[in-house]
Image (tube, helix red, strand yellow):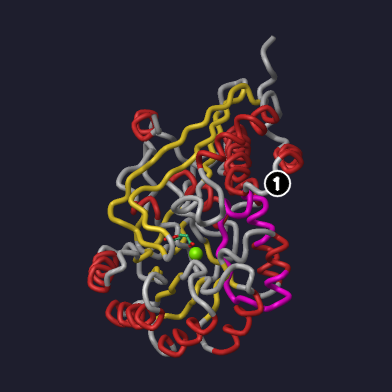
Amino acid sequence: AALPPALVRSIETFIVDIPLRRVHKLSRAVLTHQSYLIVRLTTADGIQGIGEATVPGGPWWSGESVEAMRALFLSHIAPLLEGRDIFSANAIMAEIDQVAYANAALKSAVETALLDAAARTLSIPMSGLFGGRIAEALPVLWVLATGELEADIAEAQEKLASRLHRRFKIKVGRGDPGDDARRAAETANAIGCPCSIDLNEAWSFADTALAQAILEGSGVDILEQPLPRADLPGLADLARRSSLAIMADESACSASDMVAIIRERAASYVSLKISKSGGPSRMLAIARMAQAAGINLFGGTALDSSIGTAANLQCCSTLPLAGGTELFMPLLLADDILEEPLIYRDFCVEVPSGAGLGVTIDEAKLRHYERK
Ligand code: MUC
Ligand code: MG
């Protein structure tokens, strides 16, 4: 007998590797491509839901990898999804937590696929499931990560001239901390735009204090995750020492992380990402905690493709962001796997207006970039 309409009938997974337009250098990783695990559900009446699991640059960020996520998904999680009602995401996610500890990015892909299918079934954008959007386009910064002063400045000037970005994040932490801080200050001053720097946990307290003294009064106004994720007292001390704001990224993955950050007053900005938090619902819960504590909300990226970017946009558009977003990755990828790319213009990225995520995968592109 045919299944009732909202039940999951089939599940597919794809690992895709998409090259970057240029090398992207983070403090502990050098990227030439980014890998994604895509989960696609199809309901009995043919509605599809897609979600993407992303770990930026590989396992160094959180220990997760597309390969391990796919193995865990196929053996332990897909069986929980077969035949289930797509309108019971909360119950399904709670069951998945019983079966698998951690694995936030994979859980994010699963919840996103369920919510995408549910919203498509209702013919509303996913943002409608969270009470609706408060913005149709969100400011988007560009991430400078060539590691070279001149190349970063030239890239920023080009982005500014084409009215794509007027805020930048500079990736540092590979070289001497003083040199890196001076390079960031010089970059910000040459561009004449506000900039943040992201260390991905690379600096010690002493390194950061030195950098703060150099950056004070430069165009760099936000210091993202200078210290290891567990060092909240260190972040709180740094926040008190300088006018540069501290943004928590790796320190702020879960709701309990957020409780600790609020208690310690360890950050004044939080970078929100569905992938590190285990999906849209949990990211939104963390955002509301931060909002209640007076911490500014920023729309972060795990270097998501257009699919994960669309999912983050659907969530972030429902929040009172104070720092805009860094949902820039579709422009750094050398190709897109969507039929219609996301729209970047006037220093913003538009929130897709169609049903669900509001994006459609290009099947030929998906097959082309799928790992063989
Ligand atoms: C991170 O830690 O912020 C975001 C932008 C980028 O270049 O790397 C990521 C991950
Ligand atoms: Mg970061």
**316 lies left or right of 79:** left
Residue 269 lies, in percent from the top left, at 57, 72
Is 352 placed above or below 217 here?
above
Residue 278 lies, in percent from the top left, at 63, 49
Image point (35%, 62%), residue name: 346
Q: Quadrant of the N terminus?
A: top right
Q: Please, what is the three-letter code of the amino acid marked with disc 1?
A: Tyr
Q: Quadrant of residue 94?
A: top right
Image point (46%, 58%), residue name: 137
CB of residue at label 1: within 8 Å of ligand 1? no
Image point (60%, 67%), residue name: 229
**190 lies left or right of 352:** left
Is 318 placed above or below 236 here?
above
**244 lies left or right of 192:** right
Q: Is residue 262 magenta?
A: yes
**124 lies left or right of 19:** right
Q: Which structural element holds mark 1?
A: loop
Residue 320 lies, in percent from the top left, at 59, 65
Q: Which residue is mark 1?
A: 101
Residue 139 lies, in percent from the top left, at 44, 64
**Which stretch did the figure color magenta?**
260-286
Q: Quadrant of the C terminus?
A: top left
